[in-house]
Image (spheres, grey):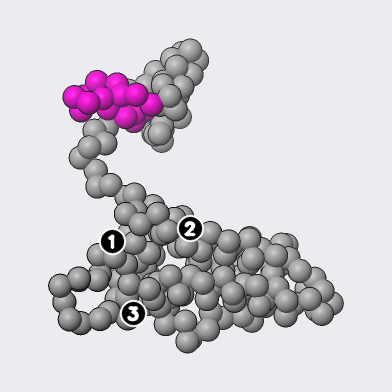
């Protein structure tokens, strides 16, 4: 990632690239190397900082299913919001509801690490905060921005709201909004509404 300063004549550019195994030298990353080469070939004056990736927490979900949760949700929403036929609206809405329900079911189902084989207590409903546990992962980073857009745009242009009975899904959303990493990176509702003003079709 290249970072450019505010100076007009002599901008300061900082290139952050993956560090090697020693945490200091250039690491194995063709994308970083490509940027490095392009800047050098263009004669750009820049500083290079290697980043030790081992010092950062891993964001990969433990459960492969967490990646797939809600994977078809945005496609169903897009079809729903772009549909202009009033007689077909119910069909597209049901398809969206089906995907939301599938996500709600996944969030309800306890993960393997929530089940204690030595305990006599049976856990029927998961209490985890996010898709893969109680910490945000890449799966959440992929799904939550789309889910936020769906919540805002569907309400604005179709007067559609995620059903309150989808308790696990609402628990997930509410927990996400409490995290600055999500809530402080969300666009405003107005930005989303403006973006979809030309995409959402009026029902006729």
Residue 14 position within the rendered picture, expressed as x and y whole percent measured from the top left: 35, 29
- Please name whichever residue, 118 or 153, is drawn nearer the observer in this view of the structure: 118
Name the magenta segment's main secondary structure. Answer: loop
Q: Is residue 77 left or right of residue 55?
A: right
Q: Which residues are magenta?
A: 12-29
Residue 98 position within the rendered picture, expressed as x and y whole percent measured from the top left: 59, 74
What secondary structure is marked by label 2?
helix
> Is the residue marked by circle 1 packed among few (<14), some (14-19), or many (20+) residues within 10 Å?
few
What residue is shown with label 2? Answer: 68
- Please name whichever residue, 128 or 153, is drawn nearer the observer in this view of the structure: 128
Answer with mark 3 or mark 2, whichever residue precedes in sequence: 2
Residue positioned 29% across, 76% down in the render: 127
When the figure is inspected, residue 65 is found, relative to residue 43, above or below; the finding is below
Residue 160 position within the rendered picture, expressed as x and y whole percent measured from the top left: 61, 80
Does residue 55 show up magenta in the picture?
A: no
Residue positioned 71% across, 62% down in the render: 199
Answer with mark 3 or mark 1, whichever residue precedes in sequence: 3
Answer with mark 1 or mark 2, whichever residue precedes in sequence: 2
Q: Give the Cα separation between the discs numbered 3 and 2.
A: 20 Å
Which residue is situated farthest in the right direction here?
Answer: 204
Are discs 3 and 1 less than 8 Å apart at CB?
Answer: no
What secondary structure is marked by label 1?
loop
- Please name whichever residue, 30 or 72, is drawn nearer the observer in this view of the structure: 72
Residue 172 in view (yes/no): yes
Q: Nearer the viewer, mark 1 or mark 2?
A: 2
What residue is shown with label 1? Answer: 135
What residue is shown with label 3? Answer: 125
When the figure is inspected, residue 176 is found, relative to residue 89, above or below; the finding is above
- Please name whichever residue, 172 or 108, is drawn nearer the observer in this view of the structure: 108
Which residue is situated farthest in the bottom direction here?
Answer: 165
């Amino acid at each position: 990632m290249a970072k450019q300063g505010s100076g007009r004549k002599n901008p300061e550019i900082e290139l952050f690239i993956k560090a090697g195994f020693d945490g200091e030298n250039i690491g194995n990353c063709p994308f970083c190397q490509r940027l490095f080469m392009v800047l050098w070939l263009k004669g750009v004056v820049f500083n290079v900082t290697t980043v030790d990736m081992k010092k950062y927490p891993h964001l990969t979900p433990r459960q492969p299913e967490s990646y797939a949760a809600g994977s078809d949700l945005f496609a169903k929403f897009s079809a729903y919001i772009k549909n202009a036929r009033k007689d077909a609206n119910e069909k597209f809405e049901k398809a969206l509801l089906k995907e939301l329900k599938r996500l709600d079911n996944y969030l309800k189902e306890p993960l393997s690490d929530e089940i204690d084989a030595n305990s006599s207590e049976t856990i029927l409903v998961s209490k985890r905060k996010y898709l893969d546990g109680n910490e945000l992962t890449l799966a959440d980073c992929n799904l939550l921005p789309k889910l936020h857009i769906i919540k805002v745009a569907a309400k604005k242009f179709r007067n559609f709201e995620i059903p309150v009975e989808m308790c696990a899904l609402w628990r997930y959303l509410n927990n996400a909004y409490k995290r600055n990493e999500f809530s402080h990176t969300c666009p405003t509702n107005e930005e989303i509404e403006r973006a979809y003003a030309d995409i959402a079709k009026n029902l006729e």
